[in-house]
């Protein structure tokens, strides 16, 4: 691994970030280190960096980020880290997952309302979570040159002195049986990590480097710390009121949650102005507005289609066979529109497992279920074969017993495609024995482990006359 000075100069020269390049010049070792600063107990810090692929490919490009943190010492060897992450690029965490807090006690997180900051990185048609290393190092306040210790399978070794933002620090390497995995720059006399360079392997062995460094640090007095703590507490309370946890890649708000957001966010934005969380509150406001508009559009589609008779379904089987002429007659029918792609395969897999359970439960009582693959590639003659192969793989992998058809003639568009409102599939459409629409549901159902898709089960059971 390159020395700290050369590594970061090369990286930021390549990325073209003048601001970071200037900030990081002080990382280079000099003949005389500045005197060790007086001990401080609270800071507001800004880190900047990027997740950089070793080889750039389509859909796999560098992902810059800014991480703002509030660091405060609670007691001897006990610290609190409040953080807010701003990502650049196509994949970003939704706002409830962009902030959090954790308490660190001599080497381990002991209390947290999140699992710590991490990037949501797109690659190979999927998204991976890339976690940051710990921002505190065990025994970091007493490090010495040549010192080494073991944590699990990792060996830490203190290499040499360096500087970040003119703050003396130790360069610490982290290795395991596969070689050097991380280099951390730990402030002298404190356990705080000021910069890091980590090896990250994603997908089929694609190597990346997670590189970040401190670019701004200012001490906080008691009043300043209290204001920032209150800001993080306010946003943590908002998550609690919404009854959601961080770490999800998608949040679909109910009418009650949207009402709560509309009531609380104006006051919250005013309260958070000038803090790292103000941008998060702005994103929350925009998200609530977008989801409200989406719900209104979905409601209009639902109103238009409810009670409508579906006399035929212009879809085909996976071998090109036409849809049975009597496929919708004299039965309660569930149409499940989803991409049915074999990759990326991400839970809850369109809820097809629960749907198959429902099919087996009510099949003999007159229920028919048709999966309808609504992969946009099906309309392209060149991409269609690959799309169909993927559907077949998924059906086999999930061991589905209900038939899956393909939609390449605009069937979903005519019925009411929720994607026109920027909503996401799946779509569940239920027809009664007269082939009239009695249920239109966009997105995932809440799941009861012992009851499956209870809401859909109730609709089906009533339509069957049970």
Image (cartoon, grey):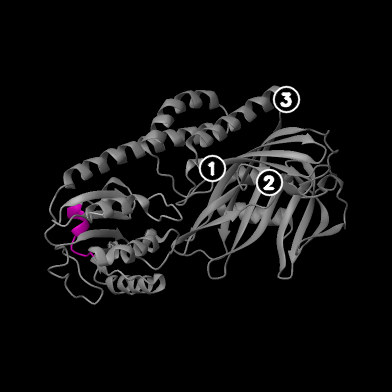
**Mark 2 secondary-structure assignment:** helix
**Mark closer to the observer (3, 1):** 1
Residue 61, percent from left and from top = 50, 58
- Is residue 332 toward the left or the right of residue 80 in the image? left
Which quadrant of the rendered structure holds the C terminus?
bottom left
Q: Which residues are magenta?
A: 407-415
Label 3 to label 1, Cα distance in Å?
Answer: 25 Å
- Is residue 385 toward the left or the right of residue 28 in the image? left
**Mark 1 secondary-structure assignment:** loop
Residue 418, percent from left and from top = 27, 49
The residue pinned by badge 2 equals 24
Neighbours of disc 1 within 10 Å: few (<14), some (14-19), many (20+): many
458 or 263: which is nearer to us? 458
Res 175 quadrant in image: bottom right
The residue pinned by badge 1 equals 98
185 or 410: which is nearer to us? 410
């Amino acid at each position: 691994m390159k020395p700290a000075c050369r590594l970061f100069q090369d990286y930021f020269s390549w990325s073209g970030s003048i601001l970071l390049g200037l900030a990081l010049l002080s990382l280079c070792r000099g003949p005389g280190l500045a005197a060790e600063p007086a001990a401080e107990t609270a800071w507001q810090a800004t880190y900047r960096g990027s997740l950089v692929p070793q080889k750039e490919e389509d859909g796999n490009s560098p992902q810059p980020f800014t991480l703002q943190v509030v660091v405060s010492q609670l007691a001897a060897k006990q610290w609190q880290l409040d953080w807010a992450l701003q990502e650049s690029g196509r994949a970003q965490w939704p706002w409830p997952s962009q902030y959090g807090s954790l308490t660190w006690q001599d080497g381990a997180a002991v209390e947290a309302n999140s699992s710590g900051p991490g990037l949501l990185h797109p690659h190979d048609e999927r998204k991976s979570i890339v976690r940051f290393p710990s921002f505190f190092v065990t025994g970091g306040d007493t490090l010495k040159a040549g010192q080494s210790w073991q944590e699990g399978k990792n060996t830490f070794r203190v290499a040499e002195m360096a500087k970040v933002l003119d703050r003396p620090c130790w360069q610490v390497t982290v290795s395991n049986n596969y070689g050097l995995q991380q280099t951390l720059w730990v402030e002298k006399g404190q356990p705080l990590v000021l910069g890091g360079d980590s090896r990250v392997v994603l997908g089929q062995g694609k190597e990346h480097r997670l590189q970040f460094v401190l670019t701004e640090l200012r001490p906080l007095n008691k009043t300043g710390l209290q204001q920032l703590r209150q800001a993080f507490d306010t946003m943590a309370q908002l998550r609690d009121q919404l009854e959601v946890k961080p770490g999800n890649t998608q949040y679909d708000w109910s009418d009650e949650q949207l009402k709560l957001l509309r009531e609380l966010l104006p006051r919250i934005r005013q309260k958070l102005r000038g803090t790292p969380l103000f941008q998060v509150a702005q994103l929350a406001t925009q998200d609530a507005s977008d989801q409200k508009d989406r719900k209104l559009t979905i409601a209009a589609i639902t109103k238009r289609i409810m009670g409508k008779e579906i006399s035929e379904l212009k879809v085909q089987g996976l071998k090109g066979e036409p849809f049975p002429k009597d496929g919708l007659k004299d039965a309660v029918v569930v149409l499940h529109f989803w991409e049915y792609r074999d990759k990326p395969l991400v839970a809850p897999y369109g809820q097809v497992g629960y749907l198959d359970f429902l099919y087996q439960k009510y099949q003999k009582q007159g229920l028919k279920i048709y999966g309808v693959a609504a992969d946009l590639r099906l309309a392209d003659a060149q991409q269609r074969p690959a799309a169909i192969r993927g559907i077949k793989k998924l059906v086999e992998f999930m061991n589905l017993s209900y038939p899956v058809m393909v939609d390449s003639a605009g069937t979903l568009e005519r019925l009411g495609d929720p994607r026109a409102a920027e909503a996401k599939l799946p779509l569940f459409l239920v027809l009664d024995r007269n082939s009239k629409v009695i249920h239109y549901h966009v997105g995932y159902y809440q799941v009861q482990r012992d009851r499956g898709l209870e809401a859909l089960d109730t609709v089906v059971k009533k339509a069957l006359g049970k």
